[in-house]
Image (cartoon, rainbow, N blue to C red):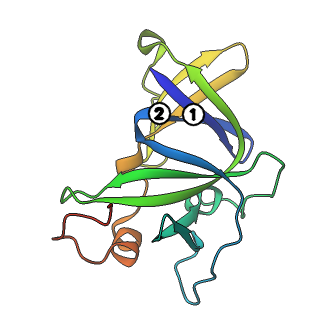
Amino acid sequence: MKVLVFHIGADRYGLRLRDVVRVLPLLDLKHLPLAPAPVVGLMDYHGASVPVIDLCLASGLPPGLDHFDTRIIVVDYRTPEGAVHWLGLRAERVQGVQDLRDDLLTDSGVQAAPFLGQVAGDERGMLQLVELEQLLTPALRIALFPNPIDGGDLP
């Protein structure tokens, strides 16, 4: 499988390429007063308002740093009700696409966070998959996408 590799803090993670819509440079975002902590703003993507969360903050770490390769990853986020929404993920040190053999993936053995999936090792160390459907807590999901019965906001 192909994964987009990036960092959350010091560690490497991967997101299945099938979930990635686009990788954008770091953009100026519209600030959202009183938004939950992981929400760092709102961006315009092809005329649609897309919320952006900081993966570091969503993981319980301090805010991510602005590196030359910090990016916003636009993904198709599917709610438990089946609605699909665009969601921006502010990710540090986006390194590009990597092939990851399924037979190298194993369970981590630790359930630290629901969105952390299987792991694989290579010459650069451990890489852990991010399970996109589990990334948002129920409260954050409701704050970002309050209408669970609609079909989503994708054109």
Q: Is residue 78 left or right of residue 91?
A: left
- Residue 81 in percent (x, y) is at 18, 60
Which residue is located at x 37 percent, y 73 percent? 139
Q: Residue at 55% of width from left, 89% of height from top?
A: 34
In the rendered structure, which amino acid carries the disc numbered 2? Leu
Residue drawn at (70%, 64%), measured in percent from left and top? 27
Residues 10 and 93: in front is: 93
Residue 130 drawn at (x, y percent): 48, 41
Q: Amino acid at mark 1?
A: Leu
Residue 152, percent from left and from top: 26, 64
**Image coords of residue 36 (percent x, y):** 52, 78
The tag on residue 17 is: 2
Task: Give the residue pinned by disc 1.
Answer: 4
Task: Locate residue 41: give its quadrant.
Answer: bottom right
136 over 124 or under it: above or below? below
Q: Quick check: marks 2 and 1 in contact, CB under 8 Å?
A: yes
Q: CA distance from mark 2 to mark 1?
A: 6 Å
Quarter of the image for the N terminus: give it: top left
- Looking at the image, residue 29 sits to the left or right of residue 69; the answer is left
Q: Secondary structure at mark 1?
A: strand
Q: Secondary structure at mark 2?
A: helix
Mark 1: few/some/many CA within 10 Å (<14, 14-19, 20+): many
State the residue at coordinates (45%, 50%).
75
Q: Nearer the viewer, residue 109 or 85?
A: 85
